[in-house]
Amino acid sequence: MIRLLRLGFLLTVCLTMTACVTDMGIREEFEKSMRAYNRMLRWQEVENAGMTYIVKEQRDDFMRSAESLKRRGVTLADFRILTFECLPDKKSGDVVAEFDYYLLPSNRIKTVTYRQEWVYQDLLKSWKLKSGLPPFE
């Protein structure tokens, strides 16, 4: 009987640790995806960022916005992640970032706050962004 209790306890500990590892993996993936996406925007790889990280339903709108940025001469100079929160149990994440940019031919730096809504897609085992680009005016 004691042996059976020990086995049950050991199984419970293993399952609990597995759940923690899974949450940590999802959190690490979120941070990795969030940082990679924002870095791609910063280095003017907007279309590539859209194809990689935007949910399929929003991709066409995102690509139109990306084309508009290019046509208007918007150049992203820097970004900062102000806050981010990952909620593995809800399979969602939120990010608030700031982007410094300028519109050619002007060299006056402007700043825009960019709120990002992320969702974890189990089928793809990856994080995707639901929100489009902010207005760079």
Image (spheres, rainbow, N blue to C red):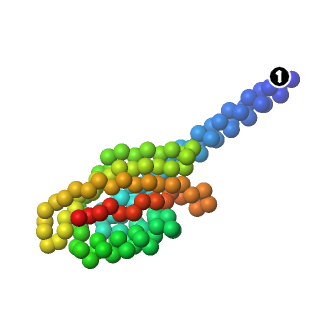
Q: Quadrant of residue 37?
A: bottom left
Residue 25 in sight in this render: no
Question: Percent x, y for residue 126?
Answer: 53, 58
7 w.r.t. 134: above or below: above
Residue 5 in sight in this render: yes
Lateral position of residue 99 relative to residue 28, left or right: left
Residue occupying the point 65% across, 36% down = 16
Q: Between residues 59 and 24, which one lies in front from this camera angle?
A: 59
Residue farthest to the bottom? Answer: 71
Name the residue that disc number 1 marks.
2
Question: Percent x, y for residue 65?
Answer: 35, 71
Question: Percent x, y for residue 20?
Answer: 59, 39
Lateral position of residue 42 relative to residue 94, left or right: left
Q: Quadrant of the N terminus?
A: top right
Residue farthest to the top? Answer: 2
Q: Quadrant of residue 23?
A: top right
Lateral position of residue 102 relative to residue 35, left or right: left
Residue occupying the point 24% across, 69% down = 74
The type of residue carrying mark 1 is Ile
121 w.r.t. 17: above or below: below
Q: Quadrant of the C terminus?
A: bottom left
Q: Residues within 10 Å of mark 1 (few under 14, many from 20)?
A: few
